[in-house]
Structures are given as C-alpha cells and as structure tokens.
Amino acid sequence: QLGALLSSKCGVDDVKILNEFSKDIGLAYQIQDDVLDVLTPQNVLGKKQNSDIDKNKPTYPLLLGLVESQKSFQELYNRAQEKLRDLSVNADELQALVAQLHTREF
C-alpha cells in the first residue's frame, strides 16, 4: 500500500484495489500453504508432511476440509487477478507473480 501511495502513477482507487488484492493474495497463499502441507511429500515440500497438524496448528484443511480449502484458495487467487485488471496502471508483473504463486508446489 505504501508503494502505491508514494507512486505518482497510482490514484486513490488503485490504492484501494491494491489493498483488497493484498488481502486476497495473502489469504490465498496461507490456505494453499496449509493444503500443500497435507498433500505434498517431504522430499518436495522440504518439511515433514502434515507437520502443521502434528504441531496442533489450526489449518484451513483441518477447519474447512481439504476440498473446500482447495476451492477457497483457487477462488482467492482468481479474485486477486481480477482485481489487478481494474488498476489504472500496468500490472503485468503482479499478474505473473500471482500465476506463479497459484501453481507453486512447495
């Protein structure tokens, strides 16, 4: 948000859009991380599978179920990308970052 506020190219609406975008992308990343902890083997993830659940951490798959968690992070990533389309400035680099995060495996 600070970067948008300091930029002479971003207007007030852009700041609002980026604020909403950052909330969506942050939550999507966290839910996806929780899902990857359940589904991804240790040799890919770099940590023991289900390590968050083993540590009694409240995770989205534990609270919502795996399928609902997967749907949620997909929807949040899609919503984040849609928000970027509403910006008055070029967001190609952010779109590429969202696409990369969306398909990450660890």
Image (spheres, rainbow, N blue to C red):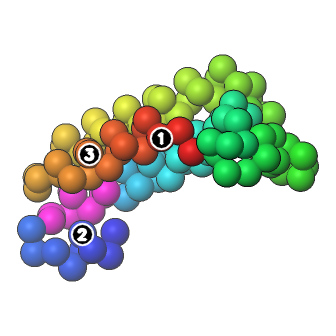
The numbered dot on residue 4 is 2
Q: Nearer the viewer, residue 32 or 26?
A: 32
| Residue ranking furthest to the top | 67
Measured from the top left, where is residue 103 in percent x and y? 43, 35
> In whole angstroms, how far apart are the C-alphas of marks 1 and 3?
12 Å
The stretch drawn in magenta includes residue 11 = yes
Measured from the top left, where is residue 87 in percent x and y? 17, 50
Instruction: Write down the region rendered in magenta.
Output: 10-18
Measured from the top left, where is residue 88 in percent x and y? 11, 52
- Given the image, on which type of amino acid does mark 3 rest? Ala
Q: Examine the rendering and report whether any part of residue 60 can be seen.
A: no
Q: Quadrant of residue 35?
A: top right
Q: Is residue 81 left or right of residue 89?
A: right
The numbered dot on residue 104 is 1
Residue at 19% in and 41% down: 85
Instruction: Kindly report which numbered mark, 1 or 2, lies closer to the viewer in this rendering.
Output: 1
Q: Is residue 98 left or right of residue 74?
A: left
Q: Are marks 3 and 2 in contact (CB under 8 Å)?
A: no
Q: Nearer the viewer, residue 16 or 60?
A: 60
> In whole angstroms, how far apart are the C-alphas of marks 1 and 2?
26 Å
Question: What residue did someone put label 3 on?
Answer: 96
Residue at 17% in and 48% down: 92
Measured from the top left, where is residue 98 in percent x and y? 35, 45
- Given the image, on which type of amino acid does mark 1 rest? Arg
